[in-house]
Amino acid sequence: MAENNEVRGVERAAIFLMSLGEAAASEVLKHMDPKEVQSVGAAMAQLNNVSRGQVTSVLKDFCATVQEETGLGLGTDEYVRSVLKKALGDDKAEGLIDRILQGGNTKGLETLKWMDSRAVAEIIRLEHPQIIAIVLSYLDPDQSAEVLAVFPDRVRVDVLMRISTLDGIQPAALNELNDIMEKQFTGKNNVKSSSVGGLKAAANILNFIDSSMEGEIMDSVKEIDADLGQSIQDLMFVFDNLNAVDDRDIQTILREISSESLVLALKGADDDLKEKILKNMSKRAAEMLRDDLEAKGPVRLSEVEGAQKEILSVARRLADAGDISLGGSGGEEYV
C-alpha cells in the first residue's frame, strides 16, 4: 500500500467505502455506473496493509470537503457540480450533472451500460442513425467503440459524423429515444433535453476503436467533410500525445503496463517519445528496454498499434480515476 500522501483517486474511494461497512458501501455502489463499480471494486479487492493513519486521513478529507462545499441544503446544485467534477473530471461529469440537475430520464440508457456490446448493437441496429448516435453518445467511449465496430462501414461513418455534430438533443429526438427505451426497459415519457455528443464524444469513441477501423472511418469522414474530420482528429488522444504528459504521470503509466507491450508499442514511436519513456525509468530498466528494442526483429504494424492502444487504454483509465492528467493535441486537459 502506498504512503498516505500518495494515495489518491480510486484508491481513496476504495478506502472510504471499505470504512463505511458492507451495508452502507453497497448503498453507495448502487448509485454508481458500471465502469465506476468495476474500477472501485477492483481497487477494494487489491487493498492491503492499509494503516489506521491512511483511513483517518481519507475520512478527514471527506468530512472537510463536505463542510467546505455545502451547508446541507444551501447551494446544493453547486455542491453536486463541484463534487462530480472533482471525482470524474469536467468532460465526463457534464452529462451526469445535466441528467441529475435537469431531471433527464436515462434509466433505459443506464441499463444499456450493463449489457454486452453486441446485445446493445442488436437492440439499436434497426433504428435511425440519429437515434444510434444519441445512444452511443450516452454510453462510455470504450463501450460505444465496441458497439460501433459491430455495424457495417457505411453505418459507422454516418453515425460518427452525427455524433460529432450533435449539439444537445432536440425534444423530438429525445421522445423517439425514450419510446425505444420504454419498449425495451419500460421507461417513462417525461424527458428533458440533455447535452450529449459533439466533436469530443466522437474523438473519444475513435480513441477506443481498432486502429485499422479507425483509419477507414476517418478517411471516409474526411472525404465527406474535410473540416469536420480534421476537427475530430485534433481532439483525439493518440500515442504520440504521450510526449505532452508530465514525467510523474508517465511513471505512473509505466507501472501499469508490461515490458512486452512497451517494447512493441515503442517500435512504432518516434525518437523523442522513446527518450521520454526511457528517462522516466530506472537506469537498469532503461538499459534492458534499449536492449530489448535492439534485439526485437520486425513486427507487424497491427501488433504495434494494438500495443499502443493497450497503453492508451491504461492511460485513459488512470486519467478517469484522477490519478494522472493527459494533455490532448490541443494542449487542453483530456480526461
Image (spheres, rainbow, N blue to C red):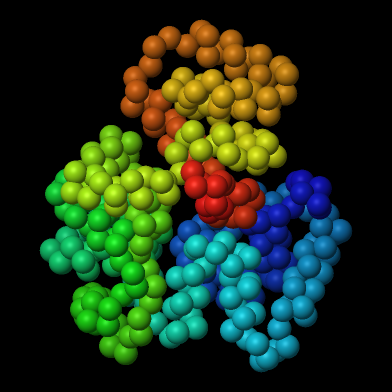
Of residues 236 and 313, the one nearer the viewer is: 236
View extreme (front): residue: 227
Side of 52 relative to 127 (left or right): right
Of residues 180 and 236, the one nearer the viewer is: 236
Side of 200 relative to 276 (left or right): left
Q: Quadrant of residue 271?
A: top right
The relative height of residue 28 versus residue 277 in the rendered view (above or below) is below
Of residues 331 and 133, the one nearer the viewer is: 331
Q: Is residue 42 visible?
A: no
The relative height of residue 29 versus residue 163 in the rendered view (above or below) is below
**Could you tell me which residue is drawn at 29 percent across and 49 percent down?**
227
Q: Quadrant of residue 199?
A: bottom left
**Could you tell me which residue is drawn at 78 percent across and 67 percent down?**
61
Instruction: Find residue 330 and report its horizontal and vertical position in percent.
Output: 50, 47
Instruction: Find residue 59 and report its horizontal and vertical position in percent.
Output: 78, 68
The relative height of residue 42 versus residue 263 in the rendered view (above or below) is below
